[in-house]
Amino acid sequence: MNKLELMRIANEVRKGIVTAVHSAKSGHPGGSLSAADIFTYLYFEEMNVDPKNPKMKDRDRFVLSKGHVAPGLYATLAQKGFFPVEDLKTLRHVGSYLQGHPDMKHIPGIDMSSGSLGQGLSCAVGMALSAKLSNEDYRVYSLTGDGEIQEGQIWEAAMFAGSRKLDNLVVIVDNNGLQIDGAIEDVCSPYPLDKKFEAFNFHVINIDGNDFDQIEAALKEARETKGQPTAIIAKTVKGKGVSFMENEAGWHGVAPNDEEYAQAMQELEKAGEALCQ
């Protein structure tokens, strides 16, 4: 799949995010939008997954450690064909299978339920270790937030992964620089991210996480890295793709009203049209 096709899919993912959160009247658009390109590349290029057989034994695994950006993951799974795009409008509704956080029991394509920040990476590490012990070839990917990695459990998991040389594990940090209370460096600075992961025996790659060429190169490098897990520090723009949401901490966990929804969708429609010319 070429870069233009990936950009078109990512734009559709962003439309799905905005639609889902607007319909729910709650949710987390900012971090979902910043990670949309990462989600798109993982599911449409990188990972061995099959929407027709979501539980196939040799599939690659994905754990969304920052579970509140579920709208981004759901919108991507819908585009991939795991469930109908129309169902995104049921996000967080009573009786909907698309809950506010991923639920492995009810949502096709979800490998691990997640919610409480800091815990997802431990689950991903366990999956990667299981593959090693069972001599299986699947790889494990986990997306964390840069605010989330202020949690101590992230570093316990990283220490274990590094010590066990889990080179089938890729940790991607969505480094959009903002969390619910503002800039991460003002709340509780985790910088320098690369040096910290290196200290835990990770191979570290710094990229622009909204650039498909850089995402592709980083994941290729991760596959070729042996004897170490890989951490990809992906610098992204919170709210990417919607002008009034970009780099605004206030859009971390707020749904757009009808007027804002219309403006956001108009911008994304225009972006989509430009990609089709």
Image: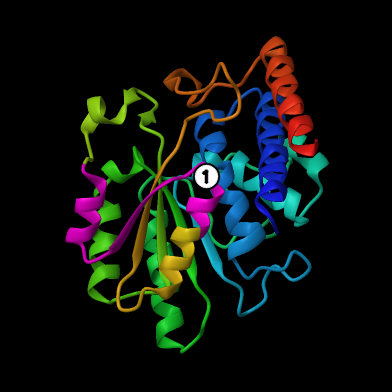
Q: Residue at x 53, y 52 (%)?
A: 213
Residue 208 makes an appearance in the image: yes
Dividing the image into 4 quarters, which one contains the C terminus? Answer: top right
Can you give x and y, in whole percent of width and height, for residue 79 in the image? 75, 49
Can you give x and y, in whole percent of width and height, for residue 251 in the image? 50, 22
Magenta residues (range):
192-216
Residue 103 makes an appearance in the image: no
Left/right placement of residue 198 relative to residue 127 reads left
Hey, what amino acid is under mark 1? Asp
Under tag 1, what secondary structure?
A: loop
Q: Residue at x 62, y 50 (%)?
A: 40
Q: What is the residue that sits farthest to the top in this orientation? A: 259
User: Is 213 within the magenta?
Assistant: yes
Q: What is the residue that sits farthest to the front in this orientation? A: 277
Can you give x and y, in whole percent of width and height, for residue 212 in the image? 55, 49
Quarter of the rendering containing residue 268: top right
Left/right placement of residue 221 relative to residue 185 reads right
Q: How many marks?
A: 1
Q: Which residue is mark 1?
A: 211
Q: Residue at x 20, y 52 (%)?
A: 196
Residue 26 versus residue 96 in the image, above or below? above
Can you give x and y, in whole percent of width and height, for residue 105 in the image? 64, 59
Dot 1: few (<14), some (14–19), or many (≥20) neighbours within 10 Å? some
Quarter of the rendering containing residue 88: top right
Quarter of the rendering containing residue 223: bottom left
Left/right placement of residue 160 relative to residue 51 reads left
